[in-house]
Amino acid sequence: MREYEAVFEIDSKGDSYAVRRVLEQVYDTIREESRSVREGSDDASALLEEFKTLRDAARDPAEGKLTITYKQYDDEVDD
């Protein structure tokens, strides 16, 4: 398994705005994907709720850190 990590330090309003936009875009993408592929499934609803929480938390400008971790498993994805 390979693991990649990106860390965003938020220490200005500009940084806060950028992170907010990233999280809004991710939430919108997951919402649309859930509608077209996994509509109504429990795992899609839980995932969407988790990203909604992140998106909402980023709405108020504040200092902090956003860490994104991507784990790539050796198994291939089925079509």
Image: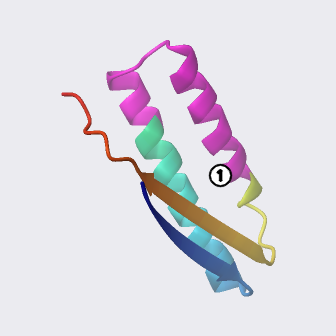
Residues 77 and 42: in front is 77
Residues 63 and 21: in front is 63
Residues 64 and 28: in front is 64
Is 48 colored magenta in this rendering? Answer: yes
Answer left or right for 3 relative to 42.
left
Segment tinted magenta in the rendering? 31-56
Q: Residue furthest top?
A: 40
Quadrant for the C terminus, please: top left
User: Residue at 54% of width from left, 54% of height from top?
Assistant: 24
Residue 25 placement (x, y as % from top left): 47, 54
Residues 21 and 65: in front is 65
Figure label count: 1
Residue 12 placement (x, y as % from top left): 72, 87
Answer left or right for 2 relative to 47.
left
User: Residue at 70% of width from left, 80% of height from top?
Assistant: 10
Residue 50 placement (x, y as % from top left): 66, 39
Residue 11 placement (x, y as % from top left): 74, 86
Residue 66: quadrant of the picture:
bottom right
Q: Residue furthest left?
A: 79
User: Residue at 60% of width from left, 69% of height from top?
Assistant: 19
Amino acid carrying mark 1 in the image: Arg
Magenta span dominant secondary structure: helix
Is 67 colored magenta in this rendering? Answer: no
The residue carrying mark 1 is 55
Kindly state the secondary structure of the residue where label 1 is placed: helix
Question: How busy is the neighbourhood of tag 1: few (under 14 within 10 Å), some, or many (20 plus)?
Answer: many
User: Residue at 40% of width from left, 20% of height from top?
Assistant: 38
Q: Residue furthest bottom?
A: 12
Q: Is residue 72 above or below residue 14?
A: above
Q: Is residue 4 above or below residue 47?
A: below
Quadrant for the N terminus, please: bottom left
